[in-house]
Amino acid sequence: MKNSDVLPGGDQSALRHLNTSRILQLLYDGTPLTTNAIAQVTTLSRPTVRGIVTALVADGRLTLDGQDATRTGGRPAQRYAFDFDAGRLAGLHIDSHGISVRITDLGGTLLTEAHRPTPAALDPDERLREAAGLAREHLPADGPPLWAAGVGTPGIVDARGSVRLSVAIHQWSGVRLADQLHELLRCPVVAMKDTNLAVLAEHRIGAARGTSDVLYVHLDNRLGVGILVNGKPFTGRTGAAGEIGRHPGLGWADTPAKLGGGSGDAMSDPGEAGHLVFTRARHGDPAARATVDSYARAVADGIGAMVLAVDPQLIVLGGALAGAGPAVLEAVREQLTDICYEVPPLTLSALTTGAVAVGGVEAARDLVRGRLFAAEQATN
């Protein structure tokens, strides 16, 4: 036995849990490997690895993945892979007028997604039951269990997953979002501000892939900011980091209405109204141009303050208005040149309206990595 397999004076059962966790994480984040390859990467002995992978195949967390094609002169070695079909993940977006859910396998591959409109004045407990019910409806009763869920919602959400303050959703302040959904879904749940999940999604699989310091700006019927620092959503002490719209001098609460008024039509969809205004401005309508300039200046004032504070590598514009395309980028970039020492690169969201649910799945995947594997179910 290698020295790395021995915990001097320690609990050998605890050591086996630790070694099992190392192997699970290696295969969860990587490619299928043989026993020899796992032993080389983890520095565990081959008998230790063989015993652990055999047990993990038996309980359904690993699966056989063919044989190594490398010719060694002997019998091809068996490869082992994490069984991503052993469970399910859910990403939820709870907003004032609807609930969206995204169900994936444990690797984040989309299996199904759905949206359900909800009344704006819905009771908080009923809103939570609707969210949990929508998720359960898309989890077959005889299928793999739900391992973890991530949920995003507008407002200030603290580190415990409780909504400290929400203006957008009726009576939502004080809801213990993570705890109450945990009780309904019977799985670990992480809850964050919706824009923080959106920026996580853009970082993992969207427009900010590979960029670790990102500012995400939500342009819709409300304005909001999500912050990513060192690849992780930054919430601050109370969860209020990025709530720049609270500053009365910026006027962000009234900014979205500027585009609706400038469209000349009474539209409920801010995306449609915004697209119309930007289109008219692009074709020389002076009133529309003035509306676009006023909107872009107000947005840039808030973004500029955030840029001066956190100095991000990239700014991602998301929400319904991002669909207006390059015209939005150019309008905001032009206004930022008068505010910032150096304007960071700007880009449009690659995920549009689904970013929050995608980020919820990514946050759930992080729970699987950091909590379920590390705990390694001490009862095993």
Image: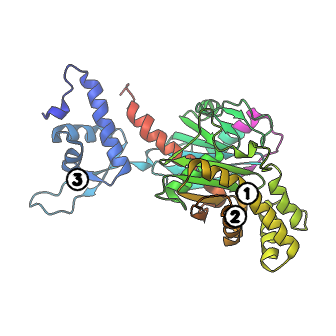
Name the residue beneath numbered marker 3.
Answer: 78
Residue 114, percent from left and from top: 66, 53
> What amino acid type should be assigned to the residue bearing mark 2?
Val
Distance from the alpha carbon under mark 2 to that under mark 1: 7 Å
Query: In the displayed structure, does residue 145 sit left or right of residue 52?
Result: right
Query: In the displayed structure, does residue 160 sit left or right of residue 38?
Result: right
Residue 299 disc label: 1
Name the residue beneath numbered marker 2.
Answer: 332
Question: Looking at the image, is 230 positioned above or below residue 240?
Answer: below
Question: Looking at the image, is 275 positioned above or below residue 162?
Answer: below
- Residue 127 is inside the magenta segment: yes
Distance from the alpha carbon under mark 2 to that under mark 3: 55 Å
* Residue in view at x 34 percent, y 42 percent: 24
Q: How is the image coloured?
A: rainbow
User: Dot 1, crowdedness within 10 Å: few (<14), some or many (≥20)?
Assistant: many
Q: Quadrant of the C terminus?
A: top left
Choose top left, top right, bottom left or bottom right for residue 189: top right
Q: Nearer the viewer, mark 2 or mark 3?
A: 2
Instruction: Assess whether mark 1 and mark 2 are in contact (beta carbons under 8 angstroms).
Output: yes
Q: Which residues are magenta?
A: 116-128
Choose top left, top right, bottom left or bottom right for residue 220: bottom right
Question: Looking at the image, is 32 positioned above or below residue 12?
Answer: below
Instruction: Assess whether mark 1 and mark 3 are in contact (beta carbons under 8 angstroms).
Output: no
As rendered, which of 316 and 100 lies closer to the eye? Answer: 316
Element type at mark 3: strand
As rendered, which of 374 and 377 lies closer to the eye? Answer: 374
* Residue in view at x 74 percent, y 33 percent: 173
